[in-house]
Amino acid sequence: MSNLLISTNPLDEQEVGRVEIASKRVVEDTVEKARKAQQAWRKYTAQQRASIIKDAFSALESKAEKLTLLISQEMGKDKRRATYEVMGVTQSAAYLSQEVVQAVSPTRKPSGTQIHYRPLGVVGIISPWNYPLAMANNLLVPALVAGNTVVLKPSENTPLVADLFVSTLNRVLPEGVLNIVHGDGEVGKALVQSNINMVAFTGSVEAGKHIMQSAAPQLHRLVMELGGNDAMIVLNDADINAAARFAVASSFENSGQMCTSTERIYVDDAIYDEFCQRVANIAAQYTVGPWDLAGVNIGPLVNKKQHQHVIRHLVDAKQQGAEFLLGSDDYHPPFIQPTVVAGLTESMLMSKEETFGPVVAIAPFKDVDEAIKLANSSNLGLGAVVFGRQNASYVAENMEAGMVGINGGVGAGDAPWVGAKESGFGYHGSLDGHRQFTQVQVISA
């Protein structure tokens, strides 16, 4: 059996490059290398570590164009969005590092008791393919500034992005502080079962449950974002144009392959028909095609498996009587045309599972409490959105989601990225989120 992981372009399935798959022994040796390096790394102050990381990210700027190309080649993201992802990572590193410094600085209680935030040791990070640079970065920087060393296992769909990311940072970082191992879920399992202290993971609920089982014998710390099936409620006093624009943009962002994409939209009966028509008109303006073609804003899906998953949802919706206002279920890989489905019901797969494709799915409701019940019917609860005025705050406070936006998107730079129900176990981002990469120590005198 080949020990090489071959990365392919979703457009034509041609090889982009290859990396070596890590054996269990290699994973264990890499973890031990990280553990030895952590003994020296933890002795730096948090500010010193942040300064080193800032210098490392400065070196990354020379690779921005190559990283952008690799993101597009490996997972099909259009060039504009790939560029934004790379720019966001390179430009936010200094701020993020300083935020972590603040988070891990000792604090003192009125009683005089001191609270310290010590490094845990070695953090295993398992990152996803849909934002292959940004998601790894959001976990990696807090872990490192807090004084931990890291072993990164990136998605097998986007190994080259991660490989270039790590190798470039390692031109500046001390040896062994940041490490990488490649492979599929078996390599991830080997990492989780190795001599690490914490697992930080972004990915599916199913994978998250397997990680919890594998981490249990050693009681590894866990921070996991496990996806969403985000609901949106449009009240009868909402700005319909603004709500329709948001619905389409959120559902189609990154070809719908985003954990906080709007997946289910519930609209007041009084404005349902008008809202559906406006959504269809806006969605029809989107252009599908290869990531390197000018004007394209919906690129290919990452692979055939994901394409088949979306088609399964569309076929199921049609069989259960949904009305396709735009698009159909007759698509060939690797593209899904912009699709607007009206008449979503609770029995459809789109209601039960994350579709993760460029699909807007809409259903009517008769009163606010019914809308809240429908929105909360999922076992997932990452993000949610409500558009409206009079009852918007009431709706937001009763939605079972970790992050809720009123008349706009979820999440802010200084707030935690957190999910409810099966969408999250722990959280990251913000001062409190950064502290999850540390051991709290209370010193009383």
Image (spheres, grey):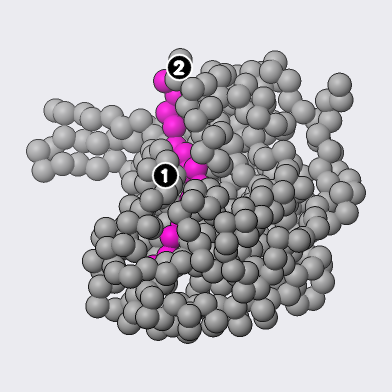
* Magenta highlight on residue 221: yes
Identify the image quadrant of the N terminus. top right
Return the mark for residue 379.
1
Residue placed most toward the observer, 67 or 295: 295
- Depicted 204 relative to depicted 191: above or below: below
Write the start and end of the magenta stretch as one range. 219-234
Towards the viewer: 37 or 413: 413
Instruction: State the image coordinates of residue 220 (x, y, percent, origin top left).
Output: 45, 24
Are the residues at dot 2 and dot 1 in contact (C-beta closer than 8 Å)?
no
- Crowding near pointer 2: few (<14 within 10 Å), some, many (20+)? some
Residue identifier under label 2: 218
Q: Amino acid at mark 2?
A: Gln
Q: Who's the residue at 47% across and 39% down the image?
A: 224
Q: Residue at x 60, y 41 (%)?
A: 127
Relative to 291, 322 lies left or right: left
The answer to whether residue 28 is magenta is no
Q: Secondary structure at mark 1?
A: loop
